[in-house]
Image: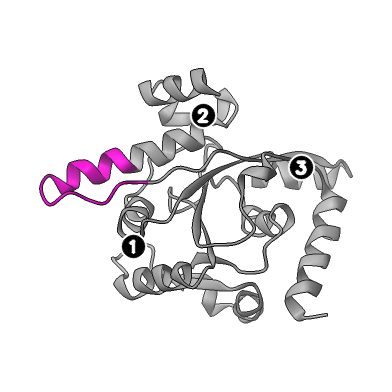
Amino acid sequence: MTMLRILRFLIRIFLNLIGRIEIRGKENVPLTGGMIIASNHIGILDIIMVYYGIERMDLFIPVAEKWEKIGWIRWLGKQLNFLFIDRYNPDLKAMRKMIALMQDGKCLVIAPEGTRSRTGSLNEGKPGVAFLAARSGFPVIPVAITGTEDEAIRANVKRLTRSNITLTGGRQFVIPALPKTNRDEALQKYTDEIMCQVAAILPERYRGVYAEHPRVKELLADY
């Protein structure tokens, strides 16, 4: 058994100990081919939840470079295919690396918000994921996570209570290539589309700044 398989096995045991986990829409996530899984980010556990819910061995996840300074996280990242990136400055080398990995058939898992939400609901998405999707042409699959908020998990662990956690996969869609003019406007539109697709499969209280977005209402009517 490879180290990755061992770690995935241990992750499943750990998560089952602390949570009752429900997976929805698993059929929406292909088992092969390059793609972008875009999810909300509400707790530190989100980073490993994907290894519980998605039966692929070729996942890779961008993680803030500050975590690379911690030895055991650096080791874990090597086993789980973390890609340490600079969240605060344009990292073109990392962008090219992510596109190359998808071209090689691998699956990118990324949070368009860029960091954990401190409120538990959606913050405004950053344009990086939309740029990747438009530049690469690979499909985007929205994923919604609930129940992994750090404070809630800690409180339930102290009470020896398992948390109710859900992962929901939505329908895939493709972001068009960026036009030659009005690129910033198009990039904002594409970012909103990705975030609204995630919001539409989240419970209402998790939708945050996208709760009243007209596109979310359109998508809800279609689900």
Furthest toward the left, the residue is 181
Whole-angstrom CA distance, mark 1 to mark 2, is 28 Å
**As drawn, 152 above or below 55:** above
The amino acid on which the numbered mark 2 sits, given as a three-letter code, is Ala
Residue at horizontal 37 percent and vertical 54 percent from the top = 133
Whole-angstrom CA distance, mark 3 to mark 2, is 28 Å
Please tell me whether mark 3 or mark 2 is closer to you in this view. Answer: 2
On the question of residue 154 being in view, the answer is yes
Question: Which colour assignment does the render follow?
Answer: one colour
The amino acid on which the numbered mark 3 sits, given as a three-letter code, is Ala
Quadrant of the rendered image containing residue 165: top right
Q: Say few, some or many: other residues with alpha carbon within 10 Å of mark 1 (under 14 / 14 to 19 / 20 or more).
A: few
What stretch of residues is rendered in magenta? 175-190
Q: Name the residue under label 2.
A: 200
Q: Residue 155 carries which label?
A: 3
Q: Name the residue under label 1.
A: 88
